[in-house]
């Protein structure tokens, strides 16, 4: 009893299509969840403004925090989605999208940390140094990847 290689290839292709669909669907749900979270957060801040606002400055920062945090998270989700689409289509730019998603995520964390500093007047210098180092490492990795891609295109 032999194993038919062609049937295994067909099974592999079907499995890849199914996994790709599941991941894309999950990311679309995550994208919609972030949008719903943003709308609910904005609605909550608006209710607080209409009610008895404790500090207008903190309410404004809360509103900005919700909008910026969720907007940047949608960018990260979109980068990961592009990476998955390219990976499963065989386009080969998946690593570039993953690095871009990581840079977007770390930039999001830096912005959120800056908002925390503005509102609470505290900063963890080690956290900021770690995030800055991570941004530099990711940017350098992306630059090296671009150089390598440019070099292989010209040969």
Image: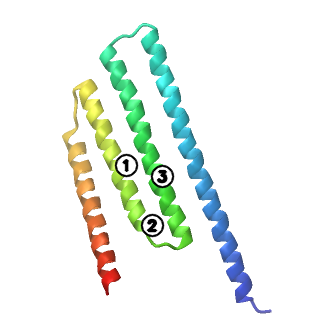
Mark earlier in primary sequence (1, 3):
3
Q: Position of residue 124 (x, y in %)?
A: 22, 38
Q: CA distance from mark 2 to mark 1?
A: 16 Å
**In the current view of this chain or complex, which residue is farthest to the top?**
52
Is the residue 72 above or below the residue 8 in the image? above
- Measure the C-alpha gap from mark 1 to mark 3: 11 Å
Name the element at disc 3.
Answer: helix
Q: Which residue position is annotated with label 2? A: 94
Residues tagged 1 and 3 counted as in contact (Cβ below 8 A): no
The quadrant holding residue 109 is: top left
The residue labelled by disc 3 is: 78
Q: Position of residue 63 (x, y in %)?
A: 39, 25
Mark 2 neighbour density, 10 Å: few (under 14) some (14–19) many (20 or more): many
Crowding around mark 3 (Cα neighbors within 10 Å: few <14, some 14 to 19, many 20+) is: some
Above or below, comparing residue 113 to residue 139 in the picture:
above
**Category of crowding for the residue at label 1, using alpha-carbon neighbours closer than 10 angstroms: few (below 14), some (14–19), many (at least 20):** many
Say if mark 2 contacts mark 1, CB within 8 Å: no
Q: Are marks 2 and 3 in contact (CB under 8 Å)?
A: no
Q: Residue at x 61, y 63 (%)?
A: 20
Q: Earlier in the sequence, mark 2 or mark 3?
A: 3
Q: Residue at x 37, y 25 (%)?
A: 62
Residue at disc 1, secondary structure: helix
Q: Quadrant of the N terminus?
A: bottom right
- Residue found 42% across the figure and 31% down from its top: 66
Reply above or below: 66 against 73: above
Q: CA distance from mark 2 to mark 3?
A: 13 Å
Label located before the other in sequence (2 or 1):
2
Residue beneath disc 1: 105
Residue 85 drawn at (x, y percent): 54, 63
Q: x, y percentage for residue 21?
A: 64, 60
Of residues 53 and 117, the one nearer the viewer is 53
Q: Does 13 sit above or below residue 64? A: below
């Amino acid at each position: 009893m032999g194993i038919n290689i062609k049937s295994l290839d067909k099974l592999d292709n079907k499995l890849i299509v199914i996994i790709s669909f599941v991941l894309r669907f999950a990311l679309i749900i995550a994208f919609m969840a972030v949008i719903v979270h943003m709308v609910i957060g904005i609605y909550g801040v608006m209710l607080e403004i209409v009610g008895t606002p404790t500090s207008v400055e903190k309410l404004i920062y809360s509103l900005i925090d919700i909008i910026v945090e969720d907007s940047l998270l949608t960018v990260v989700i979109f980068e990961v989605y592009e990476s998955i689409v390219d990976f499963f289509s065989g386009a080969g730019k998946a690593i570039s999208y993953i690095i871009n998603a990581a840079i977007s995520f770390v930039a999001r964390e830096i912005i959120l940390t800056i908002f925390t500093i503005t509102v609470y007047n505290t900063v963890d210098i080690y956290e900021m140094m770690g995030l800055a180092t991570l941004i530099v490492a990711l940017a350098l990795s992306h630059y090296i990847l671009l150089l390598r891609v440019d070099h292989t295109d010209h040969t």
